[in-house]
Amino acid sequence: MQIFRLVIIVIFVITIISCTTDQNAIATMKNATIPAKEFITRYTNLVQSTGIKDTRSSRLEALKHLISEKILIDLQDNSEYLNQPHFIEQLNQIKREVLLAFYKKKEIYNKIDISENELREAYVRINEKISARHLFTRSENEAWEYYNSIMNGVTFEQLAPLVFSDDSLANNGGYLGYFTWGDMESNFEDAVFSMKPGEISKPVQTSYGYSIIKVEDRFKSPILTEHQYQIKKDKLRRLVLIQKMKQNEKKFINQLEENLKITINDSILELLSDALSSKTIAFSSSSHEISKFQYSNEILVRSSFNDWTIEETILYLSEIPLSARLKIKNTKFLKAAIKGLVIQKYLLKDAEKKGYGSDEEVEEMIKEWSRTKLYELKIKNIVESSSIDSSYIYEYYKEHKAEFITDDLYNIQEILLETKHDADIIQLKLKNGENFDNLAKKYSIRPNADHTLGISGYLPITRFGILKEGIKNSVIGKVNGPFNVSGNFVFYKVLDNKKGAELKFQEIKDGILAILRQTYQRQHFDSYFKNLIIEHNVKIDSAYLFSVKI
């Protein structure tokens, strides 16, 4: 579970002191300390990856997380977890992923050069703004819980208070406002810039956790000035590097695939695909179970690297993460997965041959990710030992019926303009009685406005960002504006609206269960963690915590 939110109350049993016996420690406990350097590094990463503000409460919540991690990972006997087959499988997957990432860094990314011309071209591209909201958690399992809750009708606004300790994000449904290319973490941006307004992502893994993202709006912004280009040059360099990393990696992999001369026997592949579909065999099948399949010894894959039988192929496929295996829904995806595995096995072997497996950076990264997985597993086991009385679900629905209503829908027509000068011209034309439809078609910079005439169609009121209050209070048919929205200018009129509908119990039941589960699990963990805090005599240097420079 997400500790930033789970230990709000119980932490006050911690003794908060004004000075400490160790001037470099921000917190102490029996047999362990949390140095300021460790806190600063982790907290800085948290701020950058989630967008939270640096406040006293944010610092305290982040420190709580470090304290719980220190106790659960460093001060408890974890042999029970370390010997679990599932955990060992996860560790092996971590080792493979880290080694592959380091190989790509050494063999591909470190060889990238960036020219001034490329930076200038990127400067021209950095002209689109997006507004979005998100939910953030360090746990993949919790991320999928949040995603499923949203798919079952729970809103970002309802979940945000459970996710964020930062008041602004907790109270505004995780709304991040408008940002552009380079403002957010790279994986977050990759997802956002591939999405349409209104679209909700599945959990997106970032450097420090997982986000479920909803894009609210996106539009082109004016070209920046030369002065702004110079200010953003370092950021542009990073953005170009990220883009070239993808391009160069693709070229590298394509060339490697060609060199490996990978061929897959399509007829044998069909036999394997049919066997998987009929559940004759499964990705999780043991070697003994696979050997019973009559075609298990047939050669499926040939390459200059190695040849694989069906049995060998299935055993290799069982190593990839479950989320990736679930995407293998037909023969086409199965073939692509097998080719990818051949390439991966070659890269891993080459990485070991070059000695990358014993590199200090690789070993440190494996250690860090292993700690994270162990921590997630322990928290999961703690919170899942709680249970919910089923009778409370319907009672909660009856008491909170007013909350389970879909957003009011509004159909508006807009004219989006690039500059104040453009807005002044349109305002004059409107005063002179020119047709709104024609002006939207001719002048609006919103994509496809020449076809849609700037008509949005029925959208939830929350989609309209800072304009939503004005839209709610606007008279139907009245032209409003111009309004400055992130540097652009907008005229709009409301064409129609529809009131939100009450959700029936069966429609929201799973969502309510998710909300109650969060509450019950939080209470259960609070009780558990309270005892840990007392047992380990945790003390925080509050003056140091709130004054240390980030």
Image (cartoon, rainbow, N blue to C red):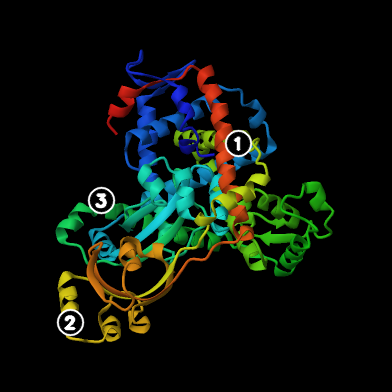
Please provide percent x and percent y for residue 528: 57, 27
Q: Which residue is mark 3?
A: 234
Mark seen at residue 383 = 1
Mark 2 or mark 3, which is nearer the start of the sequence? Answer: 3
Residue drawn at point x = 38 percent, y = 40 percent = 45
- In screen coordinates, is 251 left or right of 322? left
Marks 2/1: CA–CA distance: 63 Å
Question: Label for residue 204?
Answer: none
Q: Residue 411, percent across and down? A: 40, 74
Residues 118 and 170: in front is 170
Q: Is residue 126 above or below residue 205?
A: below
Question: Outermost residue toward the top?
Answer: 21
**Mark 3–mark 2 CB contact (< 8 Å):** no
Note whether 208 is above or below 412 in the view shown: above
Q: Determine the image quadrant of residue 38.
A: top left
Q: Earlier in the sequence, mark 1 or mark 3?
A: 3
Residue at 73% across, 64% down: 273
Nearer to us of marks 2 and 1 is 2
Q: Is residue 212 visible?
A: no
Q: Which residue is mark 2?
A: 431
Quadrant for the C terminus, please.
top left
Q: Secondary structure at mark 2?
A: helix
Q: Answer with the quarter of the image where residue 342 lies.
A: bottom right
User: In the depicted view, which residue is nearer to us: 190 or 506?
Assistant: 506
- Callout 2 amino acid: Lys
| Residue type at tag 3 | Asp
What x and y, as percent, mark residue 418? 22, 71
Tell me which corner region of the image, top left, top right, bottom left or bottom right, holds residue 34: top left
